[in-house]
Every structure is written in structure tokens, then in C-alpha cells.
Amino acid sequence: MSLFRKVMGFVKPYKMVFYTALVLTIVLSALGIVRPYLMGDIIDLYITTGDKNGLLQLTLIIVGILFVEGIVQFFQTYLTNWLGQSVTIDLRAKLFKHIISFKLRYFDKTAIGTLVTRVISDMETIAEIFAQGLLTIIGDLLKLILVIVVMFFINWKLAILVLIPIPILLVATNIFKNAIKSAFQDVRTMVSRLNAFVQEHITGMYVVQVFGKEKEEQAKFQKINKEHRNAHIKSVWAYSVFFPIVEILSALSISLLVWYGVRNVLEGELTFGETFKFIFFINMMYRPIRQLADRFNTLQMGMVGSDRVFKVLDTDERIARTGDLAPERIKGDITFKGVHFAYDSKNFVLHDINMEVKSGETVAFVGATGAGKSSVVNLLSRFYEFDQGEITIDGQDIREYNVDSLRKNIAVVLQDVFLFSDSILNNITLNDPSISREKVIEAAKIIGAHEMIMKFPDGYDHNVRERGGMMSTGQRQLVSFIRAYVTDPSVLVLDEATSSVDTETEEMIQNAIERLTEGRTSIIIAHRLSTVQKADKIIVLSKGKILEQGGHFDLLEEGGHYKRLFDLQFS
């Protein structure tokens, strides 16, 4: 019920639609009872008496009721489905907004395919709560109650007789409901696993094919695929057992009606019309009961999906956004004091980091893979929260800054450039309307990438496809430099930005870096020492600790760790 209340909370903006659909559901249930009742009256009042005029009038009334029922059914179906989709779009928007506010640590431990399932597949099951679940259940229950009341009104003895199989049906329905709930939970779990597997392996298809592991990965997929099939078969088995039971019990009620009804008709205690009504009502009684089990399962499946969605919504993995300091532009003075950091809160990757970067300085971090270079940048942009110590920008604690304002002042160029399936222009501006095409072209010319972009068929409007698959590594890197340049950041971070490009492109980027770093605080992370020799300060990291810091020539004269790295690369 707690979960159900959460879902219903999203109905509040559409409560008039909900209440309208509810009223239409009630009207529809009532109209469903009227037609068979009047058809029984046709037999007793007009057919047996030969009253043709009365027969015609009542027939026209029944046709009119059928017409009204069709109209009500149309609007009820439309409104319930519209309501489901409206709730879904609001909930999906809230979920996606919540997900993009998570710390990167959350994505390190959560499969992307699982989140895709939450945002897409699980949302569709929530829509079904309104389209085929809640209101439909209310309508079926109301119709069932009305049928039983009317049967008792017509002939209470006959009503009791035809209801004899109902206790058996209720027990069977409860067993079916529990079995199908377990089956649906297994189905949703396997759908999530299947999505996660497919998402990950299509993204990493290059690795699969390079190492010739198609057969092995196909075998893994077959195993998950079979488990997915078995979960569905479990639900199919429950249906295949339950529906025949319903049909048998329905036939038993009809048999009892025929056995008892015919004798009473002959004795004059029951009319043909009343018997006819009971035949209709038995079908109308069993059909809602049979459908109720299905509707409850739809509702349960929606609740299972809701549970998964709200678990993500209730996950508190967001960076604390308590800071309200939002300067238009920061100077770029950066200080780390006694900073410790661990990705898992146990195994620390940074130990007692103390450093100072003055506004306008270019500082380079060097060291072996895993030394902690990228972790420093992640903390500076508040992608992760540090565990101990203090980080300040312009003398203010980094946590006092508004996160959005802070990140707008910091531009990061990564080694692995991610491009969206969109135009080159939109990948540079990231759909920011304040960045004009002219500004992008000017930036591309400064970086030296304008001619490269114009060689594509549609120039700046060329679609680079998923992850920038239509561009080379060097071309993607140049696009990322333009992306950083047009934001005019106060702090520029280059994280291995030249490690994956050829010599010619690296020279182009080195020229761009000189223009890009001019007048702003710059942090360069690099393996190639040739790219950091002009830095104002070089910080040498090893196993999360600062070993040395100083200028290029000063560190060479010290003959320490930096000197050994330099000799290894240039010997």
C-alpha cells in the first residue's frame, strides 16, 4: 500500500481525468448488467405473449443501450490509457533527472542495461496499472457484485445453487495469483539481466571480435536467454492450469442451473426469461473473476516495476548540493590540503594530497597508471566526494559552490572522447543555445579543425553516429577541444588528451593547447612527458602520494622519480 500510494501520488495532476475514468467505469459496469436483464424480459413479456410492438420497442432500447455502452467504453479506454501514459512520462522524467544527478561512483557499480530497464521496460508496466489494472479491477468487482445482487433479487435459491462452485474458484484464483506474482518477478529480473548483457556486449563488440570470443559470448547469451524463456514459461504454465479450471467451474454452474431451472420452469416456479438471465449472469460472473486474476497480475507486475523504479528514486547517491556560491566566473586559485580519497570508502587511492595551483598557472600531473592523477580531477569537478581534508577554489571550500556553477567554470578534455549520435555542431555546443554556430566555427579555426570538419559531407551538421563512430580517434579529440574552448572555462583540465592521437594531430593539439591555456588555470594529466615540459609546475604522483613537485629542469636536476621517468621515455 505504501508503494501504491507513491504511484498514486503521480495521479494528482490528472485527478479530474482519473475521476472521470472512474465514473465511466462504474457506468460501464451498470450498463453491462442492464442488457441481459432486459433480454430476459423480452422473452417473458413479449416473445411468449406475441407482442411484436413491445418486442420492437424493447429491442430498440437494448440497441440504444449497446450504442451508449460502446461510446462509454471508448472514452473509458482512452482516458485510462491516456492517464497511464501521462503518469509514466512524469515518472520517467523524474527518474531520468534523478539518475543524471548521481555520483559517478553509482555508475561504477551499476550495470547500464539495468538502468535502461528501469527507465524503459519497468515504466511500461506502471502504465498498465492504469490502462489494464486498477480501474479495470474496480469495474470488474463492481460488475461482479451487481451480478450477484441481481441474481439474488430474481431468485435467491437459484442464485445460491449456481454460486456453489465459487469457493473452489476463489481458492484456485488465490493460488494462481501467488504463482503468477512469483513468475512475473522472475520475468522482470531476467529482462533486466538480458538488457544489461546485450547493452554491455554491443557496446564492447570491438573487444569481442578482436579476441575472437563470439562463440563464448554467444554461449553466455544463450544461457541468459533460456533463463528468460523459462521464467515466461513458468507464467504460461500458471495460466494453462487456471483457465481450464475456470471453464470447468463455469460449466458446472450452468449444469446446476439447467438441472434445477428446467424442473422449476415446468412446475411454474421459474420463467424462461429468468433462466435466460441466469445463463447470461453466470457468464458475466465467471468472466470478471477470471479476468480479475489477470488484472491483479497486471497490477502486481506494475507494482514489481514500481518497486524497482522507486528503489532507484529512493537511492541517495547524489552529490550534496547544499552550496549556494555561484560566481559568474572564478579566478582559478586551487588548493588541496590533506586530501584523502577512496572510491569504495576503504581502499584509498589518494593519501594526504597537499598542493597549490595559482590562477593562470599550468600544472601537470605525471606518474604511472593508477597513481591517482585522474582522481584529483574527479574531486575537483565534484564527480566524487573526498573522504578527508579540504579543497578550496579562490579561498572558498569547494562544497560551498553550487555544483552546476562550479562545473560550468571547469572544462574537461578526456582521453576517451564520448560523442553522441548527433551533428558535430550539437556535440560541440551540447545543445546550449547561447553558443552560436559562428562561435563554434571561430573556435574550430583556432584549434585548427575547421578544414577537417568541412571535409565531412554535411560539415558541422554531419551526424557522427553513436559514440562518434564516423570519426577517427584524433578527429573526436579535436572536437572535444573545440567543445572545451567554446565554453571559455576558468579552469581547463586535459586528462591524457594527446595519448591516443598521431604525431601530426598531436602537434595540432599542442598548438591549440597553448591558445587554450593562455590566461586560465590549466591542469594537464599526461604519460607523454613531452607534453608537460612547458608547465609552470609538474607534480609527480605514485600510489596516491605526491613524490615530487617543481619545474621540468628543477626536477631533472633533483634526479628523482621524474628523472627516471624522463630517461625511460627519451633514452
Image: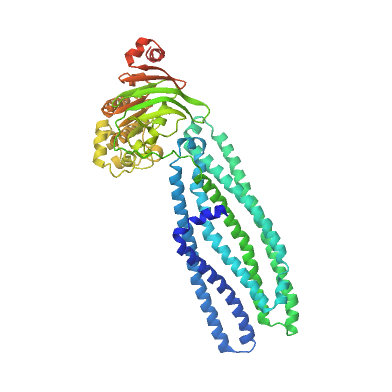
Q: The C terminus lies in which quarter of the figure?
A: top left
Q: Nearer the viewer, residue 524 or 323?
A: 323
Q: Nearer the viewer, residue 570 or 324?
A: 324
Tell me residue 182's x, y (percent).
64, 50
In which quadrant of the rendered view does residue 436 lie? top left
Question: In the figure, 375 relative to 428: above or below?
Answer: above
Coloration of the structure image: rainbow
User: Left or right: where does residue 473 sit relative to residue 6?
Assistant: left
Tell me residue 157's x, y (percent).
73, 76
Question: In the figure, 444 relative to 190: above or below?
Answer: above
Tell me residue 241's x, y (percent).
69, 57
Tell me residue 177's x, y (percent).
65, 56
Number of marks in the image? 0
Q: Nearer the viewer, residue 496 or 204?
A: 496
In which quadrant of the rendered view does residue 278 lie? bottom right
Q: The N terminus lies in which quarter of the figure?
A: bottom right
Q: Nearer the viewer, residue 193 or 363?
A: 363
Kindly tell me whether residue 289 is visible in this rendering.
Answer: yes
Q: Residue at x 55, y 82 (%)?
A: 59
In which quadrant of the rendered view does residue 335 lie? top left
Kindly tell me whether residue 381 is visible in this rendering.
Answer: no
User: Left or right: where does residue 349 sit relative to residue 225?
Assistant: left
Q: Residue at x 67, y 75 (%)?
A: 152
